[in-house]
Amino acid sequence: LADEINRTPPKTQAALLEVMEERTISMAGQTRQLPPLFTVLATQNPIEYEGTYPLPEAQVDRFMVKLLIDYPSEADDMIILDHYNHSRDLHREVMERLEPVASPEEVLEARRAVQQVTASEDILRYIQAIVRLTRQHSQVQLGASPRGAIHLLLLSKAAAAMEGRNFVTPDDVKAMAPAVLRHRLILTAEAQVAARTADQVLESVLGQVEVPR
């Protein structure tokens, strides 16, 4: 877990992200292979800029998805306050109740199941068209990379598997596109001044690409 990764100096960021790409780590002259379940989760605060080191585009591109966490709902706010109102050490109580939801073997089995999901040529062309249009959109300075297209395909397969299907549908691709592509787009200065977001641009892109039947 790389907490507040944008507060990490560039040399440390580069070392971590190199490990993500090569899946090996070198220490004391020895190179070790990372376990198959090695995964990096990173957080950053989008509001704070002082004392931060934004990740370069090539490094951001190595993350498969970017999830946005909004404020809790009104009901969740009350649940949080109620818990703290009746607990002396909520953090400890929560940690004591944590239980694994899957074993490493089960995660590897799930990955193998996703690998069995197929995508037709129409789906591949649909993904290609979406990614290529992000590069041509008038409000995008830098569009999604080939790695973005690969990640969109892989996550669409995972979405299909979670729905109990062994094939990808256009709806899988559309549902996964924002999470996979939002952090890969750099908007033009004009779009930023107009307060446009990557998600809004992606909505425009998805609306322009013909959906395969």
Image: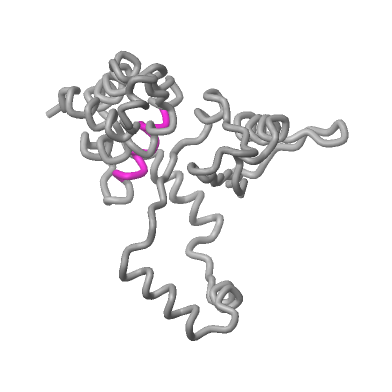
Residue plotted at (32% across, 39% down): 176
Q: How many marks?
A: 0
Is residue 51 positioned above or below 210 on the image? below
Region rendered in magenta = 150-160
* Magenta stretch holds residue 25: no
Which of 48 and 68 lies nearest the eye of the viewer? Answer: 48
Q: Is residue 58 above or below residue 158?
A: above
Q: Residue at x 61, y 41 (%)?
A: 5
Q: Nearer the viewer, residue 51 or 8?
A: 51
In reply to whether residue 154 is colored magenta, the answer given is: yes
Left or right relative to 201: residue 61: right
Tell me which corner region of the image, top left, top right, bottom left or bottom right, holds residue 20: top right
Specify how the rendered protein is coloured: one colour
Q: Position of residue 136 (x, y in %)?
A: 30, 13
Q: Residue at x 65, y 38 (%)?
A: 51
| Residue at the extreme bottom of the image, as rendered | 86
Q: Quadrant of the C terminus?
A: top left
In terms of image quadrants, where is residue 166? top left
Relative vertical location of residue 201 with respect to residue 160 in this rendering, above or below? above
The residue nearer to you, when weighing 191 against 169, is 191
Q: Give the residue displayed 27% in from the left and 50% down from the top.
A: 163
- Asked if residue 22 lies left or right of residue 32, the reply is left
